[in-house]
Amino acid sequence: MTTAADPQASPIRTDVLIVGAGPVGLFAAFEAAVIGLSCQIVDALGRIGGQCIELYPDKPIYDIPAIASCTARELVERLLAQCKPFDVPIHLEQRVATVEQRDDGRWTVRTGQGLVFDVAAILLAAGNGAFMPQKLALPEAVPLEGRHVHYSVPRLAAFADKVVVVAGGGDSALDWALALREVARRVTLVHRRPGFSAADSSVELMRRAVDAGEMDFVVGAISGLNLADGALRSLTLRTLDGETELEAEHLIALYGLVADLGPIAQWGLTSHGGRIDVDTSNYESSRPGIFAVGDLANYPNKQKLILSGFHEASLALRKAYTYAFPEKKRVHVHSSYDAKLAQKIAATG
């Protein structure tokens, strides 16, 4: 399995192009191999794992069947191990730009970085599409990004023994504030109002931690960043009582994400609210041969769960099979699949 690719002169021919290397995209690659489809994966991000790795790599996940608990990072590692016997190519930092359906029914897909694919079907598993964190509207925050101002938590250990302020009132803000109290010297949660949009259980846990002196909570809005020798030293907060200063070596602003379909919005797919409408019998979009699964898919009673994405990908690929092999009446799992998989696992260790 590769994690990068150079632009090639000739198109890469495969049965299915999977757009998105998050958990759902990785499971889709495995499922494609199970039913005899070749596939390749592209992702605009620079590493495998999608939004799980970008936003909450060390946060526990509890809704994966047969796994009582695992972090997002561990889930991605397990899915990669599951795919490993099939050597699925993964092309990172490749954002799909255009799609064109040819007279033979197959698709020509081009990335903005120069890769060209010749595919029978396209499976969009790109989470919320091209997503960007909502950033601080303070010019002094820009040069501090990645050093003292953060919009995600790549590693808890990076904040060991630091004075950290977490800003936001959603699940991510509360979860990370609670997690950081285990490693940081001091953690303060800042939110513009006393109420939260997070789960009640998280709010209760946060309030108990504050009462126990394990962390602090301040109602206010960040109005300035104060530096010393190019490093963050404190924040200026606007509160009901006026302005106050709060010590901070690191600020983690978790105000949510701005979802954007990016170039996908120009593909002529029916969508609502930044998500693609699909037929729930096969998760096909309004353009036959293009499928959407995971958070990107829109349909009545949609549940944004990883396990839902796994189910959606499985059904979508069975319909994709009919585009790759129109001469076959039904999907056939190779009768020698178990033996072949056992051989590959033995060979790869």
Image (cartoon, helix red, strand yellow):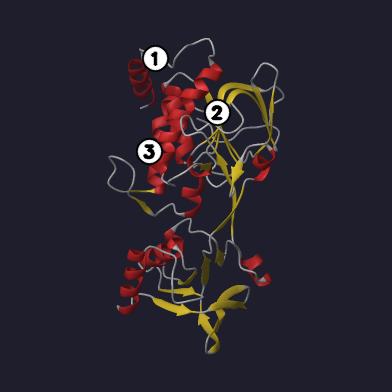
Residue bearing mark 2? 40
* Residue bearing mark 3: 78
Question: Which residue has dot 1 on it?
Answer: 334
Q: Position of residue 296 (x, y in %)?
A: 53, 43
The residue lying toward the viewer, choosing from 342 and 95, is 95
Query: Could you say which quadrant of the image residue 339 lies in?
Result: top left
User: In terms of secondary structure, where does tag 1 sit?
Assistant: loop
* Residue 12 screen position, x and y as percent: 63, 23
- Mark yes or no: residue 80 visible: no
118 w.r.t. 334: above or below: below
Q: Distance between the Cα atoms at labels 3 and 1?
A: 23 Å
Q: Which residue corresponds to the image point at 47% horizontal and 49% vertical from the top-left?
A: 53
Question: At which x and y percent is residue 59?
Answer: 39, 55
Q: Which residue is drawn at 46% across and 23% down?
A: 318
Q: Nearer the viewer, mark 3 or mark 1?
A: 1
Check disc 2: other Cα within 10 Å, few if <14, some if 14-19, many if 20+.
many
**SS of the residue under disc 2:** strand
Q: How crowded is mark 1: few (under 14 residues within 10 Å), some or many (20 or more)?
A: few
> Three-letter amino acid code at disc 1?
His
Closest to the observer, 344 or 31: 31
SS assignment at label 3: helix
